[in-house]
Amino acid sequence: MTNIDVDELTKDYGATRAVDRLTFSVRPGRVTGFLGPNGAGKSTTMRLVLGLDRPTGGTARIGGRAYAALADPLRRVGVLLDAQAAHGSRTAYNHLLALATSNGMSGKRVEEVLEEAGLGRVGGRRVKTFSLGMRQRLGIAAALLGDPEVVMLDEPSNGLDPEGIIWIRELMKRLAREGRTVLVSSHLMNETSSFADHLIVLGRGRLLADLPMQDFLNSRSRPRVRVRTAESNRFGEALKRKGYRAEKGEDGCWTVDGARADEIGALAATEGLPVLQLMDEQATLEQAYLDLTAGAAEFESVASTTTTQEA
């Protein structure tokens, strides 16, 4: 198994501690979302894992070894950290060919990843003519070049159009199904909720959460059910008899706190009440994330108190 294992990882820049004794593991077979506010230490942690920065303390290992000690690292780890890193005067094909040749791979593999990234028809164009989304696709193609066991992507959806976002989402899921280790840093909560199986959340360089997605959502929200019946008043009476706290909305739907859909559905069936709508409600990933990281952001906006007065 090829884990990414971080143990007591620490990084100081002078008097500033960017990463504070982090310990976690990223495991194969699932997409792990790597979340945190700006300045939380996500990018620094990824750089430490890849040996691009030297830790002040602790260790980071991929498959039990430091990145610098890996044989054929491009075949072991595929990375996207900065889509702007490609030389602008090279063609997309030649950019990838330089990486492939230096790692003992053929031009055929370059053609394969260009096609997979949707750049097959523009491989002969210079990188400086590419849009941000096209550069992002090129960076992802480079990450896939060695058919790696581990894939680390920093903001992979940045600059992509809707089709591209769907493509990268499905790509990450497929890589995980194939048993690879996939770590994805992102600020897009709605997008992360669509692909991540597991979450690691940082705040001010420290570990705030390391949980499966559903467990994370459950831990940050109280269960609640939304239900509509054809006999609203009788349903309200049944809820009251059973001790449920419920509120009826203007649209006729009941919101039942501290309950789940299966138990409320069973109650309705026992009472012989026809159910027209029944669904569990929980916090979105964005709500749960903001609740967890409140006070952990290095940069926080302050609502403006400026008002406009009529002349």
Image: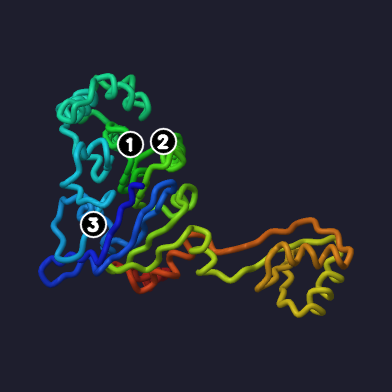
Q: Quadrant of residue 278?
A: bottom right
* Image quadrant in which the C terminus is located: bottom left
Circle number at residue 60:
3
Quick one: label 1 or label 3, which is nearer the N terminus?
Answer: 3
Instruction: Judge from the rendering whether residue 205 lies leftward or rightward of residue 293; answer left or right.
Output: left
Give SS at disc 2. helix
Q: Residue at x 21, y 28 (%)?
A: 100
Q: Report which residue position mark 2 lands on.
A: 164
| Residue 148 drawn at (x, y percent) | 31, 37
Residue mark closest to the camera, 1 vs 3: 3
Outermost residue toward the left in this view: 14
Q: Position of residue 3 (x, y in %)?
A: 33, 51
Q: Residue 59, located in which quarter of the rendered image?
A: bottom left
Name the disc covering residue 226, or none. none
Q: Residue at x 20, y 25 (%)?
A: 97
What's the residue type where badge 3 is placed? Ala
- Where on the picture, by quarter, is residue 210? bottom left
Which sits in the foreground, 68 or 125?
68
Give yes or no for contact between labels 1 and 2 (Cβ–Cβ under 8 Å): yes
Find the distance from the CA under tag 3 to the CA under tag 2. Answer: 32 Å
Q: Residue at x 15, y 29 (%)?
A: 102
Relative vertical location of residue 88 with respect to residue 48 in this rendering, above or below: above
Q: At numbered mark 1, what does the secondary structure look like: helix, strand or loop?
A: helix
Which labelled disc corresponds to residue 133?
Answer: 1
How much space separates mark 1 and mark 2, taking CA atoms?
A: 8 Å
